[in-house]
Image (cartoon, rainbow, N blue to C red):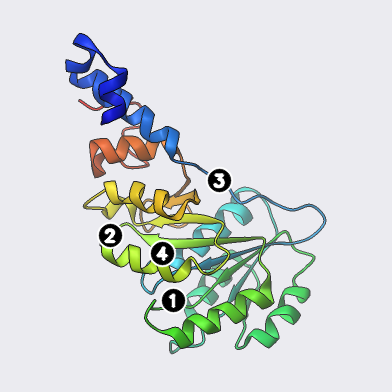
């Protein structure tokens, strides 16, 4: 707001459309984006998804797998480290069966390297980790051991846009101890409040990778775009990704 007041003097500062457009521009300047997963040459690219319980990691992994395997023709494998929930890997196995992709379940950190070595000739390995409560120190330590063994090329912290800022802040404090490279927001189409997304990105100081915009696989996932996110924050959830693509300002 202070920047807008300084930048827009006179009548420009009293025009609502001009103010909002300038505000969105300033927001997009401070939001950094990472772009899509970067594929390594000559070996499999390993990407881990971590985050609290219930944020939609498994569905997000399926969307990414479908995008790279079905739309880009990459050789993709799915790995789950979720051994806490009963039949936790069933959902991922079903996705793998539908897309004809190999799925592996890893029960301990000691077995991670052998599984990844088995899949090393593929293009992309997506690791779906168990959801961890930030208050469960034992499971957080297990996650640390899995990540240390896997040594992923990218680690995406998955956060749900339906969470409260307090819950997100608590998750950030706990998961920041890991080598998080990027932030991925899910359920952006269900967000009741949008401004906290900017707070999260600034607090973590990490780049936005993807956002998910619904339940459809593989359609409802997009590469993070600073301008789109700024427009959503200013305009509200109805200006979220996947909607109102032609509108540059906010009425």
Q: Say above or below: 76 vs 91.
A: above
Q: Which residue is mark 2?
A: 165
Marks 2 & 3, CB-CB < 8 Å contact: no
Place residue 104 in its image quadrant: bottom right
Between label 4 and label 3, give the one nearer the viewer. 4
- Residue matched to label 3: 34
Element carrying mark 1: loop
| Residue situated in front as seen by the camera: 206 or 126 | 206
Q: Return the residue nearer the eye: 251 or 202.
A: 202
**First in sequence: mark 4 vs mark 3:** 3
Q: Mark 4 or mark 1, which has the lower sequence index?
A: 1
Q: Which residue is mark 1?
A: 131
Q: Circle 4 sits on which residue?
A: 172
Task: Name which residue lies at 54% across and 76% down.
Answer: 93
Q: Is residue 116 above or below residue 62?
A: below
Q: Marks 2/3: CA distance?
A: 23 Å
Mark closer to the chain start, 3 or 1: 3
Q: Secondary structure at mark 2?
A: helix
**Gap between marks 4 and 1 measured at Cα:** 14 Å
Disc 2 to disc 1, how far (Cα)? 18 Å
**Quarter of the figure that contains the C terminus:** top left
> Few, some or many C-alpha atoms within 10 Å of disc 4 (few <14, some 14-19, many ≥20)?
some
Q: What residue is shown at x 32% (from left), y 19% (from top)?
A: 7
**Distance CA(mark 4)–CA(mark 2):** 10 Å
Eye-nearest disc, 2 or 1: 2
């Amino acid at each position: 707001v202070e920047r807008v007041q300084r930048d827009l003097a006179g009548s420009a500062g009293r025009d609502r459309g001009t103010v909002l457009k300038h505000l969105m521009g300033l927001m997009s300047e401070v939001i950094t984006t990472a772009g899509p997963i970067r594929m390594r040459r000559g070996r499999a690219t390993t990407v881990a998804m971590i985050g609290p319980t219930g944020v939609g990691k498994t569905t997000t992994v399926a969307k990414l797998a479908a995008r790279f395997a079905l739309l880009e023709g990459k050789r993709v494998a799915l790995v789950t480290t979720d051994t806490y929930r009963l039949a936790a890997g069933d959902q991922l196995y079903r996705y793998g069966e539908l897309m004809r992709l190999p799925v592996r379940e890893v029960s301990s950190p000691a077995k991670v390297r052998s599984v990844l070595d088995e899949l090393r000739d593929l293009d992309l390995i997506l690791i779906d980790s168990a959801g961890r409560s930030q208050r469960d120190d034992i499971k957080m330590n297990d996650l640390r051991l899995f990540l240390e063994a896997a040594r992923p090329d990218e680690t995406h912290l998955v956060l749900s846009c339906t969470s409260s800022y307090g819950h997100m802040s608590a998750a950030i404090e706990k998961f920041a101890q890991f080598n998080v490279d990027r932030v991925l927001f899910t359920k952006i189409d269900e967000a009741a409040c949008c401004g906290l997304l900017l707070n999260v990105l600034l607090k973590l100081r990490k780049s936005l990778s993807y956002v998910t915009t619904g339940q459809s696989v593989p359609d409802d996932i997009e590469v993070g775009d600073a301008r789109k996110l700024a427009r959503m924050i200013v305009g509200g959830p109805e200006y979220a990704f996947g909607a109102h693509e032609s509108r540059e300002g906010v009425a």
